[in-house]
Image (cartoon, rainbow, N blue to C red):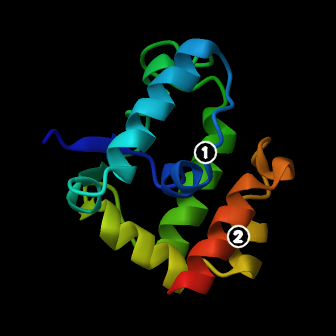
Amino acid sequence: MLRLKFRAHHFLCALGFQGKGYSPDFVDNFQQKVDLLKDEVHGPAQELEIVEGLDAICEKCPNQDGAHCGSEHKVLRLDQGHAEALGVTNGQIVTWAEMKKRLAERMTLEKFEVVCAPCAWKSLGACRAALETLIKSK
């Protein structure tokens, strides 16, 4: 199983992913990553390395140039807020099961409103709904 690189804010994005995105290639790539995480056998043990900068989700995003995100200033704010809320640092290796547990235990709905405030996708409500479901299931 390959270790995936994930920006700190993409853990919640993966939890709430609804098959929408910036382009068909982006959506297909994101769906492949989410399918890996949702796999009942291997998903919980999937290793994820927390990184600054482009990650496995960003691979097919049309808003990146191969080295940087076109919205890096906003995305860095998202990453910093999520890293602080989840208690993770760059370079740390975690499993998807561990991150789901951290999301359920540490990402309150109040924190969600603050750390996800800069996100253009927040208004769709998918991440909040997925987080509410996860918190209720713990």
Residue at horizontal 42 percent and vertical 19 percent from the top: 67
Up/down of 129 relative to 10, above or below: below
Residue in front for this viewpoint, 55 or 32: 32
Please identify the quadrant where the N terminus is shown: top left
Instruction: Determine which quarter of the picture holds residue 70.
Output: top right
| Disc 1/disc 2 C-alpha distance (Å) | 16 Å
Up/down of 20 relative to 23, above or below: below
Q: Earlier in the sequence, mark 1 or mark 2?
A: 1
Q: Which mark is residue 132?
A: none
Label 2: which secondary element: helix
Label 1, residues with CA under 10 Å away: few <14, some 14-19, many ≥20: some
Residue in front for this viewpoint, 77 or 59: 59
| Left or right: 64 in relation to 88 | right
Residue in front for this viewpoint, 86 or 43: 43
What residue type is disc 1 on?
Phe
Residue linked to disc 1: 17
Q: Which mark is residue 112?
A: 2
Q: Residue furthest right?
A: 123
